[in-house]
Image (tube, rainbow, N blue to C red):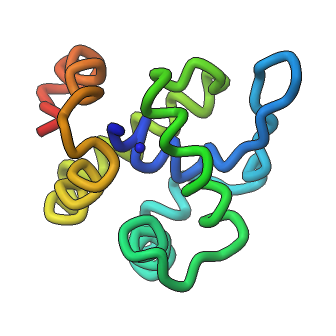
Amino acid sequence: MKFVLICALTFIFAAQVIVADKTIINRLGQIDVNTILENEWLLNNLLKCLIEGKRCTKDGTEIKKFLPEAIRTGCAKCTDSQRTGGIKVIKHLIKEKPNEWKILLDKFDPQKVYRARWNPVLAKDGLNID
């Protein structure tokens, strides 16, 4: 979450329901990650939901519920597309919204336990989780 992403936001788009076979059903399968990331209003509202708990949509509420587990487990129950979407969101936040990214990291991984797990993934693009 706990670490943000795959966080932060696989989090944005991994608002899911866990089923018996330990896979995740993507309730947000119709949402295009690019649309959210390119729309400042949508992204800011989702960030307010995750950070402040304000004005959460139904999907935002589901994301908040799922995010801590996804962070803790390294998104073990995520599909490949959810993992890819989450990484894309993290990269966007690191580059475009570093202040919000730091707030999310501190909120969902205050003890910095889960961050190291994601650095190798992000390092491929010259990024660091912190």
Question: Residue 31 versus residue 6: which sits nearer the camera?
Answer: 6
- Residue drawn at x 20%, y 21% is 116
- Residue drawn at x 63%, y 65% is 61
Q: Quadrant of residue 21?
A: top right
**Of all residues shown, which one is farthest toward the front?**
111
In the rendered structure, the answer to whether residue 24 lies left or right of residue 7 reads right
In the rendered structure, the answer to whether residue 111 lies left or right of residue 69 reads left
Q: Quadrant of the N terminus?
A: top left
Question: Residue 35 versus residue 21: which sits nearer the camera?
Answer: 21
- Residue drawn at x 20%, y 49% is 94
x and y, in percent, of residue 121 in the image: 29, 19
Q: Quadrant of residue 111?
A: top left
x and y, in percent, of residue 90 in the image: 33, 43
Examine the rendered structure and indicate whether residue 73 appears above or below residue 97. above
- Residue drawn at x 24%, y 27% is 113
x and y, in percent, of residue 115 in the image: 23, 29
Examine the rendered structure and indicate whether residue 104 appears above or below residue 90. below
Q: Quadrant of the C terminus?
A: top left
